[in-house]
Amino acid sequence: MNELDPESVRYDDRGLVPAIIRDSGTGAVLMMAWMNEESLRMTRESGETHFWSRSRGELWHKGATSGNRQRVVHIATDCDADTLLIDVVPFGPACHSGEKSCFGNDEADRLNLAPLMATLRSRRLNRPPDSYSTQLFDRGLGHILEKVAEESAEVVAAGKSESNQRLVEESADLLYHLAVLLVERGVGLEEIAGELESRSGKSGIRPSG
């Protein structure tokens, strides 16, 4: 995967390039659409996906009428610069049928934290100075534990009396800080997955203790 250089994008003879849209949180592929130079520029400038409709012959802003917008997190190209990969935060279904993904829901429903864990391990090892994760690792285990406790309390508060969107946002903050704790302690996701699997089939998944 290569960082986007707008000048290097290779459009086809119609002036179009395919764009694969991926959920930045789960890694699930949501849809594929076409972009031209103008829609890519609008996507970069607005921070939301814009495409080119081949059937209508016009630009379209994803979610402009349905509200199912996509906030852009990252844009990259493949090795030949003739396909775009766009990571987004989706605000509603990606598919016109109402499904989360045009490729079915099984993949879209899976939370994939592996990319986050890989990034955090890199931050802990290399300590880039402008990284919030570096600040957490530099301040040590005690501070990380305080942040996990703080974010846990905010999830409880959001679950009790705030909107679903706030609950989503606070849950994401908690998962991030929990991932930092796991990396700091050298615990892998596979260990947690193994523990959960060991509890399945025993009157449901039950907490320990």
Image: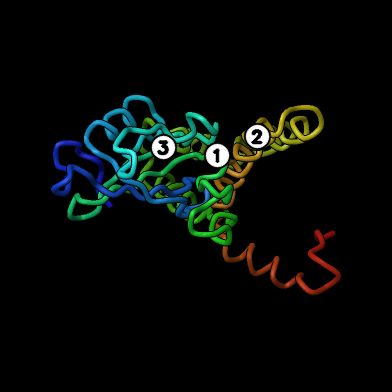
Report helix, strand or loop for mark 1. Answer: loop
> On the image, numbered disc 3 is attached to which residue?
73
Describe residue 110's horizontal placement relative to residue 150 as left or right: left
Q: Residue at x 36, y 39 (%)?
A: 74
Which of 38 and 195 lies nearest the eye of the viewer? 38
> On the image, numbered disc 1 is attached to which residue?
140
How busy is the neighbourhood of tag 1: few (under 14 within 10 Å), some, or many (20 plus)? few
Q: Amino acid at mark 3?
A: Val
Q: Quadrant of residue 128?
A: top left
Question: Which of the two discs, 1 and 2, labels the residue nearer the N terminus?
Answer: 1
Of circles 2 and 3, the one toward us is 3
How busy is the neighbourhood of tag 3: few (under 14 within 10 Å), some, or many (20 plus)? some
Q: Quadrant of the C terminus?
A: bottom right
Describe residue 132's horizontal placement relative to residue 209 as left or right: left
Q: Residue at x 40, y 47 (%)?
A: 21
Q: Residue 92 at x, y = what percent?
A: 57, 40
Describe residue 2's horizontal placement relative to residue 47 as left or right: left
**Disc sitting over residue 170 in the figure:** 2
Q: Residue 153 at x, y = what percent?
A: 75, 33
Question: Which of the two discs, 3 and 1, labels the residue nearer the N terminus?
Answer: 3
Which of 12 and 157 lies nearest the eye of the viewer? 12
* CA distance separating discs 2 and 3: 18 Å
* CA distance separating discs 1 and 2: 22 Å
Report helix, strand or loop for mark 3. Answer: strand
Q: Quadrant of residue 39?
A: top left
Q: Residue at x 58, y 61 (%)?
A: 106
Figure check: 100 above or below 194: above
